[in-house]
Amino acid sequence: MYNLVMKDLKLGVNPWFFALPLILGGLMLIPGWLYFLVPLYFCFITVPNMFGGFKSQNDLMFSTMMPVTKTDIVKSRVAVIVILELMHLVVAMIFSIFTFLLYPHLTYIFFAPHMGFWGLCFIMLALFNLIFISMYYRTAYKYGAATTASTAAAILFAGAAQWAGIQYPWMNDIFYGSGLDNTALQLSILIAGILIFVALTLIAYRIAVKRFLKVEIL
Amino acid sequence: MLALELKNLNKKYPHFEIKDVSFQLEQGYIMGFIGVNGAGKTTTIKSILNMIQADSGEVSILGKNMAEHEIELKQEIGCAFGDIDFYTRSKLKTLTDITKRFYKNWNDDTYYSYLRRFKLDENKKIAELSTGMKVKYSLTLALSHGAKLLILDEPTSGLDPVSRDDLLDIFQELIVGGEISILFSTHITSDLERCADYITFIEQGQIVASSEKNEFKESYRLLSGSEAELSEVKEHLISYKINSFGFTGLIHAKDIHPSSTLRATTPSLDDIMIYFAKKEGVHV
């Protein structure tokens, strides 16, 4: 499994996609932007390009010829997705510290990048993983429909969360009002987000393994 | 010991099936796996490598069941698919560095000696290699991890006669120690006339015969005679062609009547393949 991850990091994934989180993190410095877009760029850019690369380079056949189990092939690929997602989120979080320093008195229309917001981002990517990974491993090479469905779900979640944050007073209070000063509340949303991310990614992995075992490598 | 044993392998697709495929390859020999395009060679090979799940049947490699010991056995197998490229924009060096991590018996000395032997430049990209060089690179990787069984799907297809000849020499050298066995599928039967010890012939998903090469060829006869003589043997012929001189047809050697006066010769592997392919088709 470790060797497969190294194979993806060194061979399968273009180094540009490891630089991308650093560059996209800079978008956090745009004052009052719709920050959900920052992690969403992972779904828009990295995923289709990366999986297009795997397909055109016959990665599936290459991996299958190595002395590894099919389960490990899925596990390592999920690990690579998670590594990249975490890079995107962690870099964006670091940049968000500077956002607050640069614009201390900004009035936010969209969510400000507090811990609770990052919790929502984790849930968004959790939904993305659940749909993308499980759909992709029906064939292990067709990534178009899986990317479209999972990205649409992530956008819908972000849109719904943002809408609820503006529309519902109790949500508004958590993400715009007095809830922002409640560190325990913010931290618990972040932790809940991370837990949901872990849980849904694990479920996606299990479904993917089940489906991939039936995939024929043609 | 048997390097490879297939027992009653079955796999059904909507429009094609491989049926009861069984054969054995003794360690230290070369087996040619022949059949026309679409006969089931690649399907069989992919079933051996567990890339395709067979509906039933058993594959054993070096005495161990493939389904149960897949990871362990893949350490002992080297494979090359003639028409598939991986990461063609990467340098050989990069691909090797990745590949060697997977194999516990990887030997750098062996690797470099084969690179020199095959005149492969590590700094070249896969895309820059000729078809023959790509096969040689696959072989280098396989041999460097100490593969005992080489499974090669159409390794010589697309190669020029000189490269093919070179590759066949290499195959023969490899088996000299008696440890390495090679199964290679091809439709270029002249390659097998030169280097194969055993022939397994697949036709429409079923094994027609699997035996020692000369024994295989000797079990058939190519009969020729006048059109009038055709009626005598017609029902025993596997198939036949009619030309201006009369007919030529393939027959099982055992079906020839001792008193027959027809001219009988030993067919080439090509002849056997062609006449079997015609069996299901229309006689011309």
Image (cartoon, helix red, strand yellow):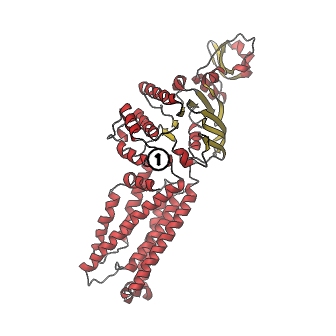
**Figure quadrant of the N terminus of chain B:** top right
SS label for mark 1: loop
Q: Is residue B145 left or right of residue B214?
A: left
**Residue A121 image-quadrant placement:** bottom left
The residue at 31%/73% (across/down) is A94
**Residue A181 image-quadrant placement:** bottom left
State whether residue A141 is above or below residue B229. below
Chain letter for mark 1, please.
Answer: B
Indicate the position of residue A179 as horizontal and vertical percent values.
39, 87
Q: Is residue A175 left or right of residue B208?
A: left
The residue at 32%/62% (across/down) is A20
Q: Is residue A100 left or right of residue B14?
A: left
Q: For mark 1, what is the residue?
A: B104
Which of B219 and B229 lies nearest the eye of the viewer? B219
Indicate the position of residue A65 as horizontal and vertical percent values.
50, 46
| View extreme (bottom): residue | A178
